[in-house]
Image: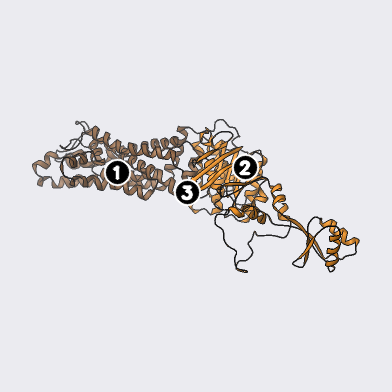
Chain colours: A brown, B orange
Amino acid sequence: MSTSTVEPVTSGADRGDDRIGSTLPRVMRSEWTKLTSVRSTGWTLLALVAATIGLGILASWGTNHGWPQMSAEDRARFDPVSTSLSGLSLGQLAIAVLGVLVVSAEYSTGGIRTTLTTVPNRMRLLTAKVLVFTSLSFVIGLITSFAAFYAGQPWFSKRGIGATLGQPGVLRAVIGGGLYVAASGLFGLAIGVLLRHTAGSITIAIATLFVLAPLTQLLPGAWGKAIVRYFTSNAGQQIAYTHQHGNYLTPWVGFGVYCLWWAVPLALGAWLMQRRDA
Amino acid sequence: MIEVRGLTKRFGSTLAVDNLSFDVPPGVVTGFLGPNGAGKTTTMRILLGLDRPTAGRALVDGRPYAQSRAPMREVGALLDAKDVNGGRTARKHLLALAQSNGIGRRRVDEVLELVGLQTVAGKRIKNFSLGMSQRLGIAAAMLGNPGVLVFDEPVNGLDPEGILWIRNFMRALASEGRTVLVSSHLMSEMAQTADRLVVIGRGKLIAEGSTDDFIARGSSNHVRARSPQQSRLAALLAERGVESSEVDGYLELRGMTCAEVGDLAAANQITIHELFEERASLEDAFMELTRDSVEYESHAPLPGQFAAPPDGPVRSSTEATR
């Protein structure tokens, strides 16, 4: 800290170095460094993995334990895959929080002004953030989903009610668990782009995915049923189920609807980001 | 080269920048001077593409900065040293910035060394003092070795050694032919750093030109003399058409140099105890210039309520002349 003379200012990179410039792959590398160099990333991903696998084991153990007392109707509705993946209902919150932070932490720390000074192309920056974060959350989500599946099935296979990847719809549901994690992360990211405020964005993301989704069951009538069917996680989680009950959407339609839940706010957030002062 | 043309920025009912036009040429340090709230930061933010102007434009090398394909090679900026994620280490912070423009790891180590932070590169930024954060911000600005540098109040919160370092640093950058724009609300600081001044108040341009011109125009120079035969000296001066008056026990006059007054006294065998030229301080000149454009004006304090400000009027002429 005692450098009081200045000499080698022009050392190193030559001025007018043509190799220097901002491109999408370069901004993605930068976003990867940013994502992996803060502690919150490790903590939220650990929460995703631990909550999804842990809760899945708990639910599988409990279902196996209560099997003798279960009614025939409940047994008919039993889905060994979605039971082992039921921890996703908590895991989705961890990845949504990380999605919010990917954007909102830039605004709450003021880092966005430094970032945009070095990458003034805002859509390039947002695209890089979306691609890097979605890749990471999909890979981690996929590994977690397979781990939760394999951790849950031993409880059922003893009774001969377990699932294997070769059965119809099972592989799709387990891969779907990874897709669901990625989409939930994007939902958080989209809310973050829209609101730019950490606490508010996390509150809205958790309320929408975790609190309001089950509460929609209380709505009366046909339109109430429609809202249940199309509401965020109610629609999205069908991709991780092997069979659907009457009221719910089919796996891919449900997942498509869930993607609209993040795509619309993300598009709106991008439009605002282009116009707002940083 | 920075060109600002008819720049206007309105926040609700307040006009932060009001039809502002000025140039920042390469090769010299241009001081961007104005009281707090004058619109300096807003102007710089628009220049860097962070804010959208209500009207007008700010161009870097003839184009809006936001359209640059190699942003970090064109412009290096330090707006607020605390605009970083404190959870990251200094090296990772710089690396992420460098990677976004395809700048290599070696350059990260170079700029860390350039600002003297190499020993704390692995520490998280939130543990940095303001002075260290300022150095880190300068390191970030230097990553792309840019031709244009923009610094917003870079000496704020720095110790004297840090201030001297930044001052020399900016002068070195300008001497290499770069364009350097640095803002401050302290005239005395700018007088020691800037070759050119752009003075604004309430978002409007007040003055633009060389620092020397500004000093000459803004200050009222006069000569003060003390002598046991003060009234005789006054009479002799009056014979030569030079008016003088007694201030604080001194004879104060304009229109003659110290040498001329000394010669006159010697020729008439008048004893001189003190004789010096006094320049009104630059701070006075600046306040005179921006008097009507200070946003939050304090009213005259009661006598003795405040001690003399550290950079208030100074009698010696050394500060004013750099």
Chain bearing tag 3 is B
Q: Which residue is mark 3?
A: B13
Q: Are marks 3 and 1 on the same chain?
A: no
Q: Is residue A25 left or right of residue B160?
A: left
| Residue B281 located left or right of residue B148 | right
Q: CA distance from mark 2 to mark 3?
A: 32 Å
Q: What's the amino acid at mark 2? A: Val
Residue A113 screen position, x and y as percent: 48, 44
**Number of marks in picture:** 3
Q: Nearer the viewer, residue B233 or A233?
A: B233
State the separation of the CA atoms marked 2 and 1: 49 Å
Q: Are marks 2 and 3 in contact (CB under 8 Å)?
A: no
Q: Residues within 10 Å of mark 3 (few under 14, many from 20)?
A: few
SS at mark 2 in the image: strand
Q: Amino acid at mark 3?
A: Ser
Residue B77 lies, in percent from the top left, at: 55, 43
Mark 2 surroundings: few (<14), some (14-19) or many (≥20) residues within 10 A: many
Disc 3 is placed on an element classified as loop
Q: Chain of mark 1?
A: A
Q: Residue beneath label 2, please?
A: B180
The image quarter in which residue A225 lies: top left
Q: Name the side, left or right, on which B132 lies relative to B259.
A: left
Q: Is residue A7 visible?
A: no
Number of the front mark, 2 or 1: 2
Secondary-structure class at tag 1 = helix
Q: Quadrant of the N terminus of chain B?
A: top right
Q: Which disc, if any, is residue A92?
A: 1
